[in-house]
Image (cartoon, rainbow, N blue to C red):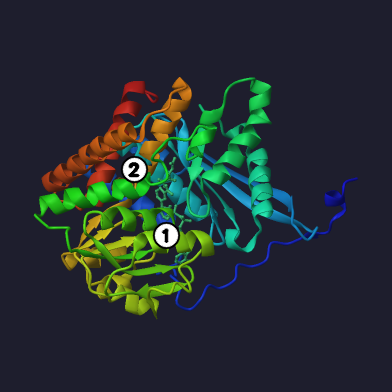
Amino acid sequence: MSKAEKSPTVPIPEAKPSSPNAAKPATSKDEFFKNIQGYLDEAARLIDLPPYIHTILQQPKNEIIVNFPVKMDDGTVRLFKGYRIQHNNLLGPYKGGVRYHESVSLDDVKALAAMMTWKCALMNLPLGGGKGGIKFNPNEVSRDELQRITRRFFHALGPNIGPETDIPAPDVGTDAKVMAWAMDTYMNTVGQLMKQAVKGVVTGKPVASGGTYGREKATAQGVVHCITEWADERDFNLGGATMIVQGFGNVGSNTSVILSKLGVSTIAVGDHAGYLYNPEGFNPHKLQDYVKRHRSIAGYPGGKPITREEFFRIKADIFTPAALENQVGVDEARDLQVRLVAEGANGPCTPEGERILLDRGIDILPDVLANSGGVTVSYYEWVQNKRSESWSIEEVDARLEKAMKKAYREVSEVARQKKQSLRIAAYCVALQRIAAAYGEREIFP
Ligand SMILES: NC(=O)C1=CN([C@@H]2O[C@H](COP(=O)(O)OP(=O)(O)OC[C@H]3O[C@@H](n4cnc5c(N)ncnc54)[C@H](O)[C@@H]3O)[C@@H](O)[C@H]2O)C=CC1
Ligand SMILES: O=C(O)CCC(=O)C(=O)O
């Protein structure tokens, strides 16, 4: 018997409360899936979605939950709970990220998986919607533990994922390195048996392992394309504009870096550890480097610590939420002093928060549109893996720009025609594509 098998099994510790300054959900987390269903219902009514399609889309096709043991550095064995929710695969294999966070729940992952279905349909990708996650705090484990957790999780998922079945990617708490471990685990288990090249089982990999140029910044790049389209529509000059950003990981930090090249200055930032203000503007490159080394903005010398409440009251042109869902509820929506909320995160505004923002004349670029650059470039990666090709960064960037601008204009046009918010318009465009495909199949003649 190995040492691991003899080790005592210990329960998963309760998540520690985060710092008082950190972002906190504005409403109960259990509302997230309900909120997403509410948007589906609203859009379904507007486009006269056949009731049988509406019924199918209300719940995911598969809810996979795995409890798997991992040996920790101190020799104990800890049990982890992992999820992979496969919402819909009508348009192609399930596709969506994997989140490592202490708040991960079945409800969250169901909401996020459904959003992937809408996002892929909106972007006209031959992909469906899925999402995964493990409930734990990745900042509290060592790199070796992180690798063992990842490998055990992907081993437990086994043939439930695959390049033509379900294709995970990075999300909160995961990155290219995690995807390399995931791919390697799959290659040495399911892939071995299939005797097939399986690089396309995950996207967001490091470039040397079959990843694509441009995936790391893709989500942020997509957010920026939407912001520039919005600015063009409103004749708003981005040069000299200011932004506040919640979440300074992949999406938040890259949005700040890319926008700085267009003259937008980030004057306040926040993450799980607290909030900082610098009216002169942060150097986003330096702050990004600092976060990569310290895993947080906490202790960064270039800003004054402020509270979460103060952050939401700072006057700026743009707010980019790039952390978690349900961050902008009633209070935050009343407090925000911006012209635009560009949703880098999934589900950052509650429906009540959104209503207040729109009533106050604050525009919202909705998540399913604004952050869809990530999955779009993941699709490019998957295509390159299938064709054994490697596209240049220029090619990836050019394709992404065209795709984002096309989607923005489609959504904006439908919003105008139907006199609806951009979010509901985006759902309408996505649902219409899904409805067309169901209709052609005549599954209930
Ligand atoms: N990575 C991607 O390609 C995509 C990500 N998204 C969404 O963007 C958002 C951010 O994702 P990433 O940047 O990839 O994750 P990340 O892990 O790189 O960064 C997450 C950020 O959120 C902060 N955060 C975590 N818990 C927090 C809390 N309780 N309060 C405040 N801040 C907290 C972290 O400190 C970090 O700054 C998520 O909503 C994700 O679903 C959406 C589309 C694609
Ligand atoms: O790149 C992907 O496949 C998924 C990205 C993602 O998880 C998201 O858009 O929320």
How many residues crowd mark 2 within 10 Å: few (<14), some (14–19), many (20+)? Answer: many
- Image height of 40 relative to 190, above or below: below
**Disc on res. 373:** 2
Secondary structure found at label 2: helix
- Image height of 385 relative to 145, above or below: above
Residue nearest the observer in this picture, 313 or 281: 281
Residue labelled 2 has its Cβ within 8 Å of some atom of ligand 1: yes
Q: Residue placed farthest to the right in the image?
A: 1
Residue receiving disc 1: 288
Question: Could you give the CA–CA distance between mark 2 and mark 1, rounded to whole angstroms?
Answer: 20 Å
Residue 281 figure quarter: bottom left
Left/right placement of residue 386 relative to residue 49 reads right
Q: Amino acid at mark 2?
A: Gly
Asked if residue 389 shows in the view, the reply is: yes
- Residue drawn at (59%, 35%), measured in percent from left and top? 183
Residue 233's spot in the image, x, y percent? Answer: 11, 50
